[in-house]
Each structure stands twice: as structure tokens, then as C-alpha cells.
Amino acid sequence: MLGTVTEVFDGAVDVLSMALGLGCVWLGWRAVLRPRRPPEPIRGPVWVVRAWGLGYVLLGISSPSSP
């Protein structure tokens, strides 16, 4: 019984981390493709917006890693 509950929670955490990773990639990719109209959280020169976007893409790609 305890193993089953743990497996359910592990699966839920995996799905949540995958969704958050994809959200980070989506948000960063929007900033990279449209640096003059970035998403709301970032404002500044074009090179800052693109660097932020690339950082978010890398964060999203690396976050849903599973053991």
C-alpha cells in the first residue's frame, strides 16, 4: 500500500516538473524569437531579453531530468 502511494506521488511530481520545464522553454523561446515584444516578466535592451530567453530555454530543458 505504501509503495503504491509513493509511486503515485512520484508520477505526479514527474508530470509537474515536465509541465514546468515545457513552460520555461515556451516562455524563453518567445523572448528569443521576439526580443522587441518580450513576455511581461522581462524588459530591457534586446541583448538582455535574448540572453534571458536563452537562459530560460536552458533551464526548461534541464529541469525535468529524472534519475
Image (cartoon, rainbow, N blue to C red):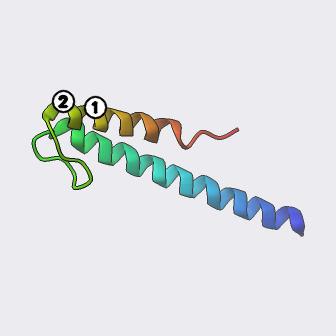
Query: CB under 8 Å between callouts 1 and 2?
Result: yes
Query: Mark 1 and mark 2: span between their CA atoms?
Result: 6 Å
Crowding near pointer 2: few (<14 within 10 Å), some, many (20+)? few
In this view, the residue farthest toward the left is 36
Residue drawn at 39 percent across, 51 percent down: 23
User: In the shown orientation, is residue 12 left or right of residue 55?
Assistant: right
Residue drawn at 82 percent across, 65 percent down: 4
Identify the disc placed on residue 2: none
Q: What is the quadrant of residue 13 in the picture? A: bottom right
Residue closer to the observer: 33 or 51: 51
Residue 41: % across, % down: 27, 53
What residue is shown with label 2?
Answer: 47
In this view, the residue farthest toward the right is 1
Q: What amino acid type is highlighted by mark number 1?
A: Ala
Q: What amino acid type is highlighted by mark number 2?
A: Trp
Residue 17: % across, % down: 55, 52
Identify the disc placed on residue 51: 1
Indicate the quadrant containing the C terminus: top left, top right, bottom left or bottom right.
top right
Residue 58: % across, % down: 42, 33
- Compared with 7, 59 (above or below) is above
- Compared with 25, 7 (above or below) is below
- Compared with 22, 10 (above or below) is below
